[in-house]
Each structure stands twice: as structure tokens, then as C-alpha cells.
Amino acid sequence: MQVARHTVIKSRTRLMGHVQRVTPAICAVAADVEAVEQWWQGKQLKVVKHSAGTEYTSCLKKMEGDDEGGRQGKAARLLESRGLNTVASGPLLRCVMLNAARLDYDSRINFDSLASVADVTRYEISDPSDVVARVQGADVVMNKEMPIPAELIQDFPPSVKLICEAGTGFNNIDTAAARTKGISVCNIPTYATEAMAHMAITLIMALSCSLVPQSQALHAGNRVHMKQCHLGTLPHFELTGKTVGLIGGLGTIGLRVAAMSLALGMRVVASSRSAPVGMRDDGIEVVGMDDLLARSDFVSLHCPLNAHTKGLIDASAIAKMKPTAFIINTARGSIIDQPALVNALSEKQIAGAALDVFGEGSAPPPALPDDSPLYKLENLILTPHIGWQRLEARQRVVEMCAENIKAFASGEQVNIVN
């Protein structure tokens, strides 16, 4: 269902000492609009009528005698019955942040840009059982990676018209259920492009010089590398001339990783479900999946998690890789078959891996159990999904969420994914 374009309504109506959100005046305008004046509770109110008919005349008449909540619900239902998605108009949309601490865990993020476009209620952490109660009366639900399944969405109130995912991936939200409910879902596809690309390159560099094993040995009291002034049999090689294979490498993040890899003198191959095989003008060679696995010194994942990519890197895929190759996953954990990877690393079928994500489902990854076999692997780097968390990226995502919400309030569909 498309969001009907609407204009901002100017109202001087005040109730109980605060600016009333003119909920009956839910605007739906086509290319041309007709301004009409209605009187409600003795105050002058300008509203906009749909050019095709008398949507608001009927809305306002049917709402007479109801309380404010009843008017809002009726307005939404009446307009939606005519195929119009509605957005409550007023001074500011009401936005509920379900888990602000996921973005602002260090209290260093400025939320002024969000406060300028929405009346924000902030919760640091929300349990799934809290969500439905906390979104009551909200126009916008802002979320960071917390699962929002169909069973929650179906109980959302009619007021909710937008779920703003404060990140790139949105597999944590049941977008089909949201669409059925008449709720738009938007994401922020580019906020962490630089941060995620830097993370992948950082891991490539760390793996190429065995930086983590050196540090682990030193902090464990093993100073053999310091005493002998070399790394023995640990991997230690230049990146120039090496090949990095990017799965999902023609996306926004993948292209940045490719550009940085090329700047380091690396060869870049990428897989694609749609691009033709061959060398591109930007220096990326598009190849088939089997070819990518066989040729790459580093296989880096940059694809979304979906039905096509879940378990993509399984035992058969790993078997096609060089024994000296490394896997890097900064995308979603379930793209890799974890037991297959554990077995491959334990048996030294490949040289090593670096995982910023792991486990099932959406990010953030569930905490690994203390007895996870991943903790026992010496040729594995583990980080707790920090790729996107650089300070600048976290600030940027808040500002871009504000832009999404502002656009939505103006009737524009920006980064809508459903």
C-alpha cells in the first residue's frame, strides 16, 4: 500500500495545555488538492480534502461525538477502507525508540536531529513483551536490530504507520506482516558503508600478519615471538597481488571494500546473481561462485541474509577454497554453516576466519554459550558485531533516521523496503 502524499496541517487548537496532534485531519492528497475549512470543538481547523471525493467530509461527520482516540481510529479505518495509507498530521509525529542503548551504549550520540522531526519517547532496552504496550499511540517505531515478528506487528495499534530500522539489514522485521497491517518499513542502507568496509579491510590486514595470534601469545605470557624476532610458521604475507573474493561484492559496501582492496594492490573478484561475467571498468572481475571460491585468498561476505544465502558457505563451498585461504564474515552469521566452518578450521582445511557476526537470525548475534567451539579455535578472530559501531556511523544513522521520518511525514517514500 502506498503512502498517500499529504501536506502539513496548521492548527491552533490546544487541549489540556499542549499542542493537539490534529488526528482527525489525516491528509491524503493527490497531485491537486482542495483546501476546505471545518469547525471542530469551536476551533478553526484547516484540513485538506482528497481531490477525488469527499473523504474528509465523511470522516469528520462520522467522528462527531467521539473522544480523541476514537476519532483517530475511525479516521484511519475510514481512509484505509478507501485504499489510502494515512499519516497522522500535527506538529510532530510521535516516535518510540525501542532500544536506544543499542545505538547509544556509551552516551556519546546526539539525538537533536531526531527530536527536531519527531516527538520521541526513548526506551534504552525493550523486552519483546513490552513492545506492544510501548508503541501505543505512536506514529513511528524506531528500532535497531531487535526482532519484530508478525505476532507483534499484528497487535500494533492503528496509529503506527512506519517502522524505521536504524540499520541496513531488515531481516529482523516481518515486512510482509507490516505491509498487511498497512505499516511501511524503511531502513538506512548507507550509514555504515565506510565503517563496514574498514572493518573488512582491518580483518584482512590482521589475518595477513597473524596480528591476533601474536597478541594472544604475548598476553598469555608466551614471548617466543619477541625473543626470536619472527613469527615462525604463522601466516605473514603481503596483500599486494593477493585475490579477495567478494560475495555480494557489487552492493554498496562490497564496492567500497573492492575499491580499498584495489588501492592495496589486490585483485578483486566478485559474484553476482545478475551482473554478467567478465571484467568491469572499475577493476572488479565478476565470476561464478565456484571460480571465486577457488581463486580467492580471502573470501569476504557482503550479501544480505535471505532464503538464497542462508547456509551459502557450507562444507561443499569450503572444500573448494585454497587451504591457505581465509573467510571473513561481517554480514550475517547464518550465511555460514557454523558447524561446517568449525570443522574446517579444526581440521585446517582453510587457514583461518574472522567473524563479526555468528549464530542464527538477525543481528546482534545471540551471545555464544561459554562452551561454544568457536572460542576454542586458534585460527579464528571473533568480534561482537562491531563493524557498524564506529562513532561516526552511529551518529550518522540517527541523522538519517530523522531524514527518513521527515520525508515520510511529507508523504515521500524514502528507503521503503516493503
Image (cartoon, rainbow, N blue to C red):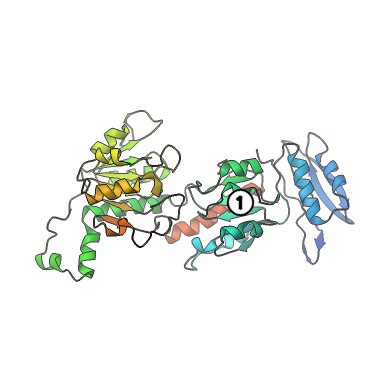
Residue at 27% across / 41% down in the picture?
Answer: 318
Q: Position of residue 16 (x, y in %)?
A: 80, 66
Q: Secondary structure at mark 1?
A: helix
Q: Is residue 217 above or below residue 204?
A: below
Residue at 24% across / 53% down in the picture?
Answer: 207
The residue that disc 1 covers is: 152
Q: Is residue 292 above or below residue 114?
A: above
In the rendered image, is residue 118 in sight?
A: no
Q: Is residue 94 above or below residue 54?
A: below
The 10 Å Cα crowd at callout 1, few under 14, some 14 to 19, many 20 or more, is some
Q: Position of residue 370 (x, y in %)?
A: 35, 63
Residue at 42% across / 37% down in the picture?
Answer: 308
Observer-nearest residue: 226 or 364? 364
Q: Is residue 4 left or right of residue 255?
A: right
Q: Is residue 272 above or below residue 153?
A: above
Q: How many marks?
A: 1
Q: Position of residue 164 (x, y in %)?
A: 57, 51
Q: In the rendered structure, which amino acid carries the disc numbered 1?
A: Leu
Which residue is farthest bottom? 221
Q: Is residue 250 left or right of residue 97?
A: left
Q: Is residue 345 left or right of residue 363?
A: left
Observer-nearest residue: 20 or 64? 64
